[in-house]
Amino acid sequence: MALDIVVQDMNHAEMQRFGDDADETLFRLCAAQPETSWLRGVYRYADTMFNRHQLEMILDQIERIEVGTDAERAAVDLLRRTASIALRANGYLLFIGD
């Protein structure tokens, strides 16, 4: 099963939920990032949460992700959109692994 991406508000209430595609494109892109990237820490089989301070850095890191396919472009757009929503809400971005 692919990752679920949950945008939470500052009280951890779910605002929106999205899913990775069946090929786990978003997870594969995160796993392929440099070891210094926060995105590299997204776990496939556990939950990973980023707070608003981490999301500021993640938005910078998103811009450095190289994409080669439409699926990768869509995954990066999803990541950018969810991180931006969570940041504007002073909330959290939660990745729910299988």
Image (cartoon, rainbow, N blue to C red):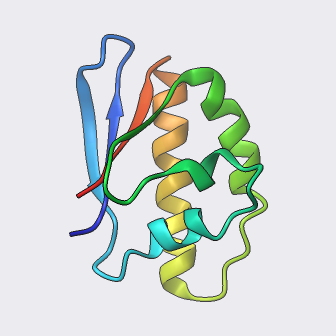
In terms of image quadrants, where is residue 93? top left
Q: Looking at the image, which residue is at 32% across and 48% down?
A: 46
Q: Residue at x 44, y 21 (%)?
A: 91
Foreground residue among 42 and 4: 42
Q: Quadrant of the N terminus?
A: bottom left
Vertical relation: 87 (above or below) 77: above
Residue 65 vertical position relative to residue 90 in the rendered view, above or below: below
* Residue positioned 73% across, 74% down in the render: 66
- Of the pair 84 and 93, the residue shown nearer to us: 93
Residue 5: percent from the left, percent from the top?
34, 49
Image vertical order of residue 19 relative to residue 85, above or below: below
Q: Residue at position x 72%, y 36% from top?
A: 57
Q: Position of residue 64 (x, y in %)?
A: 78, 61
Q: Which percent across, then down, holds residue 68?
A: 66, 87
Q: Residue 13, percent across and down? A: 24, 20
Q: Which sits in the foreground, 69 or 26?
A: 26
In this rendering, position of residue 93 left or right of residue 13: right
Indicate the quadrant containing the C terminus: top left, top right, bottom left or bottom right.
bottom left
Q: Residue at the far top: name it.
A: 11
In the rendered view, does 76 fall on the left or right side of 11?
Answer: right
**Left or right of 1: which side holds 26?**
right
